[in-house]
Image (cartoon, helix red, strand yellow):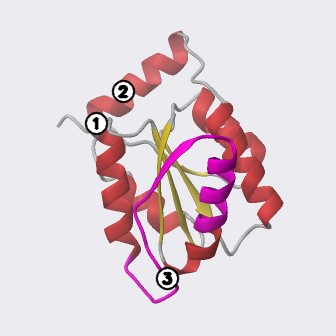
């Protein structure tokens, strides 16, 4: 599995912890920035990761900012991206099972490290639940980006 990861300044330290965690699990992860806690504009990072995932250079992406919301809004502007703000294990699981989310966005200021670690774990381990209703809905979402 290849994971693209990035953050703004608010998510910098959490991003680094996630990278360390993924590497400990022998998961191939590439850092798209930022490289410090100096203020940056989150859309710049979100677009890089969203394009890399949409182009199939990476299997999935993880974006971290203060709330996860700005990153998700930005990433979802790129055709083929289904970025989900996850705030518990169930939303991490369902975003993959039902929505085939390909980018996880997290709020660094909203959760403890053990919670974030678990959300990442659940997101990455959960496959899409193939089936009529879920596939039909994903196709409808995809059609919206084709206009």
Circle 2: element type: helix
List x then y, in percent, for residue 33: 42, 69
Which residue is the site of mark 1?
Answer: 144
List x then y, in percent, for residue 106: 61, 60
List x then y, in percent, for residue 23: 62, 49
Residue at the farthest top position: 132
Circle 3: element type: loop
- Seen from the viewer's position, the closer of residues 42 and 69 is 42
Which residue is the site of mark 2?
Answer: 140
Examine the rendered structure and indicate whether residue 125 appears above or below residue 133: below
Of pointers 1 and 3, the one earlier in the residue sequence: 3
Mark 1 and mark 3: Cα distance apart in space: 36 Å
Do the numbered discs 1 and 2 sit on residues whose CB atoms are within 8 Å? yes
- Which of the two discs, 1 and 3, sits closer to the camera? 3
Quarter of the rendering occupied by the C terminus: top left
- Seen from the viewer's position, the closer of residues 135 and 122 is 122
> What residue span does the magenta drawing correspond to?
15-41
List x then y, in percent, for residue 113: 78, 64
Circle 1: element type: helix
Mark 3 and mark 2: Cα distance apart in space: 39 Å
Picture residue at 31% right of the left edge, 58% below the top: 48
Residue 35 located within the stretch drawn in magenta: yes
Which residue is the site of mark 3?
Answer: 36
């Amino acid at each position: 599995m290849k994971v693209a990861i990035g953050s703004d300044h608010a998510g910098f330290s959490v991003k680094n912890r996630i990278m360390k965690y993924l590497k400990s699990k022998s998961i191939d992860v590439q850092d798209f920035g930022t490289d410090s806690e100096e203020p940056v504009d989150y859309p710049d990072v979100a677009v890089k990761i969203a394009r890399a995932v949409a182009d199939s250079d990476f299997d999935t992406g993880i974006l971290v900012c203060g709330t996860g919301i700005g990153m998700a809004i930005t990433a979802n502007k790129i055709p083929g991206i289904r970025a989900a703000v996850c705030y518990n294990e169930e939303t991490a699981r369902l975003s993959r099972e039902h929505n085939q989310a390909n980018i996880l966005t997290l709020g660094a200021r909203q959760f403890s490290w053990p919670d974030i670690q678990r959300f990442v774990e659940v997101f990455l381990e959960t496959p899409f639940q193939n089936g009529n209703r879920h596939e039909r809905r994903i196709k409808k979402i995809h059609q919206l980006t084709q206009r």
